[in-house]
Amino acid sequence: MEKEKSVLIRFLGDTPYMRVIDFLIDNIGYDYSKTEISRGAGVGWSTLYTLWDRLEEFKLVTPTRKYGKTQLYKINDKSSVVKKLLSMELDLIEQSAPHVARSKTAA
């Protein structure tokens, strides 16, 4: 069974970049290795590698701690861009809530 797409993905598009951001936003407060982020977001490791510089350039991710030789990262919840994405996601959820409720009662 395929996981239902988040409102953020439905609104901004289902791209590997957005899947990574969506995964990190959905798991705000938790830190992950790049391999875990790749798996959780459903993107290949090589794809994540090509996106990673942009995530760091715009300060969307922040390193948290090391686990052995592995660096862990999380969404940078202090970033103004991330705060706006979170706010947009909440607005989209509020706007889609009545529509979702109506479609479930019609089924």
Image: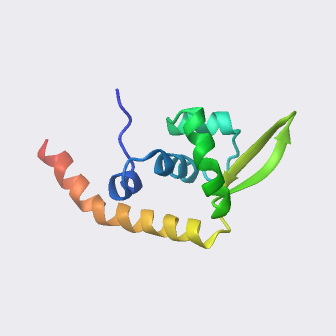
- Is 24 situated left or right of 74 in this image? left
Figure quadrant of residue 62: bottom right
Counting from the top left corner in percent of width and height, residue 61 is at 67, 56
Residue 76 shows up from this direction: no
Q: Is residue 85 left or right of residue 52?
A: left
For this orientation, the residue located farthest to the left is: 106
The answer, for residue 17, to whether it is visible in the render is yes
- The x and y percentages for residue 95 are 30, 66
Q: From the top left corner, tell me how far across and down residue 36 is, in percent.
A: 64, 35
Q: Quadrant of the C terminus?
A: top left
Q: Nearer the viewer, residue 103 or 11?
A: 11
Apparent side of residue 69 relative to residue 6 in the rendered image (left or right)? right
Report the residue at 68% width, 68% height from top. Answer: 78
Q: Residue at x 66, y 33 (%)?
A: 35
The residue drawn where x is 59% and y is 35% is 46
Above or below, 47 relative to 74? above
The foreground one among 47 and 72 is: 47
Q: Could you say which is closer to the camera, residue 105 or residue 52?
A: 52
